[in-house]
Amino acid sequence: MEKTIGHHTHGSHEERKRALLRDGEFYRTGVAHARAQIKHAARPEVMLHSVIDHATWALRARADALLKPTGTSISVMAPYALTVLGFIRKRKLGKPALGVAAVLGALGWYLQRKRAQQVAY
């Protein structure tokens, strides 16, 4: 008669013993691997990297949500944005570009507010 140990069904005592030893070794390896992962994840530079990844993901998700009505996304806009940023850096136009971005942002806010007031009436 065959006995069942865990999920194994083996005939002889030696086979069951080998299966249990093999399962024990897999378990010990899994525990050692989990401990190594925890030790690695607790390092300050890994924690900082995780925080930056999470923040980047959150900002990208927010930006994609804002761009969704236009039918585009960050991944579509990124090559163009990087080209423009490279041009601005090469020509040392950082301060004027920030000024233009601020004016465009204020103009967009004003137009959105004006449109919201028109819809309210």
Image (cartoon, rainbow, N blue to C red):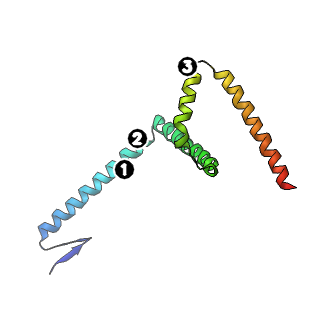
Measuring from the top left, give residue 10's x and y in whole percent. 16, 72
The residue carrying mark 3 is 90
The residue carrying mark 1 is 34
User: Is 35 on the left-hand or right-hand side of 73?
Assistant: left
Measuring from the top left, give residue 63's x and y in whole percent. 61, 45
| Image quadrant assignment for residue 102 | top right
Label 2 secondary element: helix
Placement of 17 over or under 73, stated as above or below:
below
| Circle 3 or circle 2, nearest the eye | 3
Q: How far apart in space, not on screen, are marks 3 and 2 (Cα)?
A: 40 Å
Label 3 secondary element: helix
Q: How far apart in space, not on screen, are marks 1 and 3 (Cα)?
A: 47 Å
Q: How far apart in space, not on screen, are marks 2 and 1 (Cα)?
A: 10 Å
Q: Residue at x 63, y 20 (%)?
A: 93
Placement of 88 over or under 10, stated as above or below:
above
The residue carrying mark 2 is 40
